[in-house]
Amino acid sequence: MIRYLHTMVRVRDLPAAIRFFCDGLGLREIRRRDHEAGRYTLVFLGENDTDAPNIELTHNWDHADAYPAGRNFGHVAYEVDDVYASCQRLIDLGYVICRPPRDGRMAFVRSPDLISVELLQRGDARAPSEPWTSMPNVGEW
């Protein structure tokens, strides 16, 4: 038997990453571990305290440079109740939707550390609507 536990991403600015994943996506902090000897903090975010998979944010205290972004990482994906409302909340917080939900089903946005995040509409796709239908792709996703 195998059980998926979490996806780990390294972040430079922990408060900025938490703002994106919690305020923007609606996750909440499940647990946090500061490791003084190793000079890093692990923050696990999820929907709730169940055994559902989490995203683990790893913040290395002494690392100031941007981590190289690579498309080989892929992305993390979250199912949302309303893809349009989720995208609008992220825009209102100042984030750019890289691949808008023109189809009413799928969108991509990047975290402050350039982690590609896919948002998938729960259930059937929403009816196509503006401004999403005519919104262009921006950058990589």
Image (spheres, rainbow, N blue to C red):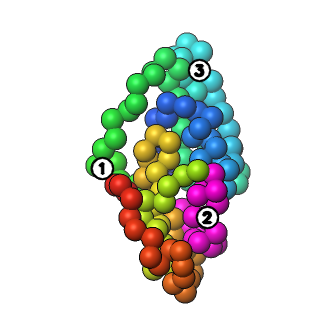
Q: Nearer the viewer, residue 121 or 133?
A: 133
Q: Nearer the viewer, residue 129 or 68?
A: 129
Residue beneath label 2, please? 88
In this rendering, the answer to whether 21 lies above or below 106 is above
- What's the residue at 54%, 52% (across, down)? 95
Mark 3 or mark 1: which is in front?
1
Residue 52 screen position, x and y as percent? 60, 56
In this rendering, the answer to whether 84 lies above or below 108 is below
Q: Is residue 129 magenta?
A: no
Residue 126 screen position, x and y as percent? 56, 83
- Label whose residue precedes the other's in the sequence (3 or 1): 3
Please state, as top left, top right, bottom left or bottom right, where the C terminus lies in the image: bottom left
Q: Is residue 92 magenta?
A: yes
Q: CA distance from mark 3 to mark 1?
A: 29 Å
Q: CA distance from mark 3 to mark 2?
A: 36 Å
Residue 116 screen position, x and y as percent? 42, 52
Please state, as top left, top right, bottom left or bottom right, where the N terminus lies in the image: bottom left
Looking at the rendering, the stretch of residues picked out in magenta corresponds to: 77-93
Q: CA distance from mark 2 to mark 1?
A: 25 Å
Q: Is residue 45 visible?
A: no
Tags 3 and 2 touching, CB below 8 Å: no
Residue beneath label 1, please? 71
Q: Is residue 85 visible?
A: yes
Judge the density around disc 3: few (<14), some (14-19), many (≥20) Cα neighbours within 10 Å.
few
Residue 35, label in figure: 3
Left or right of 7: which side holds 91?
right
Q: Nearer the viewer, residue 4 or 138?
A: 138
Q: Secondary structure at mark 3?
A: strand
- What's the residue at 51%, 84% (across, down)? 128
- What's the residue at 51%, 70% (across, down)? 120
